[in-house]
């Protein structure tokens, strides 16, 4: 059974930083076939879920324009953990952040949630001005 558990959310002032973590279990068997993609999404109240960043099995990363230069996605395969380092946070970054995974690789540049079948429960990030 695949499980994704996020942590690291919290409340910070604008300009601050946070590091989100997502521990992934049960996904190893699927990943052993070679290709996979992992991602961070976020959803603010009253808004649709939007892609923040992806990283695939080749290490290729993709970011939404709104977070480029501020957020960094990475993975530690030994620890089976996905990370999102968020710097220079802005009030508009306030949302619930979700990690996601799948063996499918989205088309280049795509941050569509429909390509991901495994999701965590989310961790709240609140940025005050």
Image (cartoon, rainbow, N blue to C red):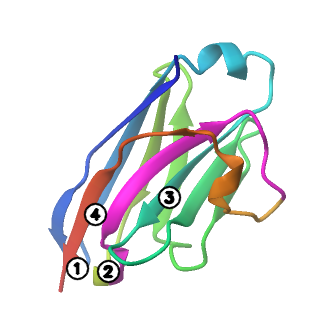
| Residue 112 drawn above or below residue 99 | below
Q: Which residue is mark 3?
A: 41
Q: Give the residue drawn at x 29%, y 50%.
A: 123
Any mark on residue 3, and which? none
CA gap, disc 3 and disc 2: 16 Å
Instruction: Report helix, strand or loop for mark 4.
Output: loop
Of tags 4 and 2, the one toward the viewer is 2
Q: Which residue is mark 1?
A: 14
Q: Which residue is mark 2?
A: 90
Callout 1 crowding tier (Cα within 10 Å): few <14, some 14–19, many ≥20: some
Tags 3 and 1 in contact by the CB under 8 Å rule? no
Give the extent of the magenta segment.
Answer: 92-107
CA gap, disc 1 and disc 2: 5 Å
Quarter assignment of residue 30? top right
Residue 7 position within the rendered picture, expressed as x and y whole percent measured from the top left: 28, 41
Tags 4 and 1 in contact by the CB under 8 Å rule? no
Q: Which residue is mark 4?
A: 17
Tags 1 and 2 in contact by the CB under 8 Å rule? yes
Residue 61 position within the rendered picture, expressed as x and y whole percent measured from the top left: 68, 54
**Is residue 105 inside the magenta stretch?**
yes
């Amino acid at each position: 059974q695949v499980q994704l558990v996020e942590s690291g959310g919290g409340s910070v002032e604008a300009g601050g930083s946070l590091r989100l973590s997502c521990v992934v279990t049960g996904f190893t068997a699927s990943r052993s076939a070679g290709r996979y993609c992992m991602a961070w999404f976020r959803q603010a109240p009253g808004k649709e879920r939007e892609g923040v960043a992806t990283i695939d099995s080749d290490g290729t990363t993709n970011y939404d324009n709104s977070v480029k230069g501020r957020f960094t996605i990475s993975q530690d395969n030994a620890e089976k953990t996905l990370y999102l380092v968020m710097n220079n946070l802005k009030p508009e970054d306030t949302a619930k952040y979700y990690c996601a995974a799948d063996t499918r690789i989205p088309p280049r540049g795509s941050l569509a949630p429909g390509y991901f079948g495994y999701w965590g429960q989310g961790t709240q990030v609140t940025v005050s001005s």
